[in-house]
Structures are given as structure tokens and as C-alpha cells.
Amino acid sequence: MNGTQQGEQAKRWNSHAGRAWAEMQGLLDGMFAEVEKVLVATVSGRRVLDVGCGTGGTTLAVARAIGGEAECVGVDISEAVVEFARGRAEREGVRAEFVRADAQEYGFEAGRFDMVVSRFGVMFFEDPVRAFANLRGAVRDGGELACVVWRAAEENPFMTTAERAAAPLLELPERVPDAPGQFGFADRERVRGILEESGWSDIDISPVDIPCAIPEPDLLRYLRRMGPVGLALQGLDEQTRDRVIETVRPAFDPFVRDGEVRYTAACWLVRAASKAAK
């Protein structure tokens, strides 16, 4: 990995993308509530590292599930979300530590954690083998890994509806297969290879289909702030932004039912174990 590539990820998550996640915390945590439950159900041990922790929802949910003996740490490259997570933990009275760092490079204490978890936070590494080797070093012998990541874009039409509808009006970046990004871990065998090469064992990558929803009145706010379209709108004048949203919004009608926007998140539940070399 070169410094320029890593700088691109840091720049992205310390500009609009990071601020949007912080500002949309309530909506996003509600949307991904069922994803959180899937991860919390996997937790074992009391010392847990949450990678790509965002605004801290999963970290705090894990800490609550473990109870008073929990030692939970969230790590994220975005200053905006880490600052939000720290304030949130204090407000909610949950003990957890949040670190702003690149989990690919950060010097974690060797063997400190019983488990690494992540909700959509591990698909952005520029050098995933190096990153997962670093995470393995942070886990004790016999410790575990559990991550939820997206399957293919074709299986997740909700997540690509906005960009398809906006394509005649906006120049949007092409989604490159296997590149760092939302669908970077869509290829199950590639993910298995990354974990094997980085020293993880007992690998299991299972499909999970998770129901997600947001209130229909929040859809416009979501479209204006999130995803490739939300990012592209930030550089446009108000009239053009409104025209794009007017074009995009009807494309989501198939997802609207009974006052909610509902879709199924087609994901992989990735699990593995850390075992000392013999």
C-alpha cells in the first residue's frame, strides 16, 4: 500500500462522508438495528474490538450485552465519528474507549482482545491482508472474528437505486469490483483468501439476509446526504440538487410500504479464529 492510497481513505472519511455518518447517526443506527443484533449475538469474551466503529452504536451495544466487565474499544479513521462516539458513550453512560486510527496500521497491544467485530467497517482497507494480519495480532490465541459485509451490488438494489436513477444527471464514480468500498468484500472466495493469507483459521462465510427500514419521511434526507449521490450533491447548486432528488425519489417507490422504506440487506457473516502458529 502506498501513502497516496491511504491518504484517499483518510481524506474521504474525514470530509463529507464522515460528517454525514455523524449527522445521520440516529437514522443509520435505526436502519441497521437488525445488523447490530446479528453481530451482538456472535460475541464471546469481554474484551472486544469494533473495527470501523462509526458513531459507536455497535460498540456500545456489545458493551451493554457483555455487562460491567466489558472492555470494548471502537476504532475508526474518521475524526468526526470518533468524537461523536465518545460523546455518545458519555451521554448514554456506557463504558467504552474510542480511538481515531487506521486499523490497518495501528499498533494494537498484542493479544489484548478476545474478539474483533465489525458492522460494514472492513471493506475499505487498501491492503486487506496487511489489515487483517494486524487485527489478528490484536486478538489472543483462540480469539474470534465476526464481521458483517455486503454481498454483491446486484443483490442489494436499494443501495444502487439512487446512482442508477441519477446517472443521466450526474457523473458518478464507477464501482470497481474488489476495490476498497462498500462492495469490496462481495466475492466470498476472495475474502476467504484474504483471511487465510493473514493467518486466520476456522473460516466460515455464510450468507445472511437482514431486514432494514427507515421512516418514509427520512428518505429525502438520506438521499441528500448518503452514498455516491449524496456525496456528488455537495458540490452542486441548490437548483441542480433539487432536480436530481426529484428524479431519484420516484425510483424508491417499490421500497415504500406502510410508511416505511424497507429493503433486505444481502450480506456475508464472516467468522474466523486466531490460533498461534505451531
Image (cartoon, rainbow, N blue to C red):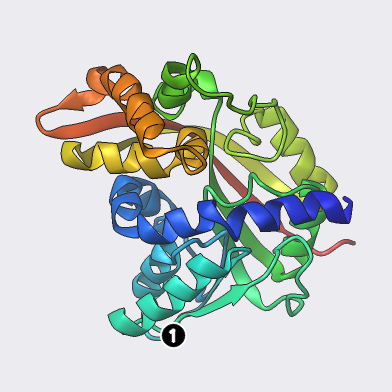
User: Residue placed at 49% from the left, 34% from the top?
Assistant: 267
Q: In the shown orientation, is residue 193 left or right of residue 98?
A: right
* Quarter-of-image position of residue 6: bottom right
Number of numbered callouts drawn = 1
- Lateral position of residue 205 relative to residue 32, left or right: right
Residue 11 against residue 239 in the figure, above or below: below
Query: Which quarter of the rendered picture does the C terminus lie within?
Result: bottom right
Q: Secondary structure at mark 1?
A: loop
Residue at 34% x, 25% y is 243
Image coordinates for residue 179, horizontal then vertical, percent: 72, 34
Instruction: Report the residue marked by disc 1.
Output: 69
Q: Residue furthest left?
A: 258
Q: Residues within 10 Å of mark 1 (few under 14, many from 20)?
A: few
The correct choice, above or below, for 237 with respect to 86 in the image is above
- Amino acid type, mark 1: Glu
Q: Nearer the viewer, residue 262 or 73?
A: 262
Q: Position of residue 239 (x, y in %)?
A: 35, 32
Residue 189 point in image, percent of width and height? 71, 29
| Residue 266 placement: quadrant | top left
Q: Is residue 245 visible?
A: yes
Of residues 267 and 101, which is closer to you in this image?
101
Rendered view: 83 above or below 90: above
Instruction: Evaluate whether residue 156 shows in this view.
Output: no
Task: Report the residue at 49% width, 66% height from top.
Answer: 81
Quarter of image, res 238:
top left
**Would you say 28 lies left or right of 12 here?**
left
On screen, 171 above or below 145?
above
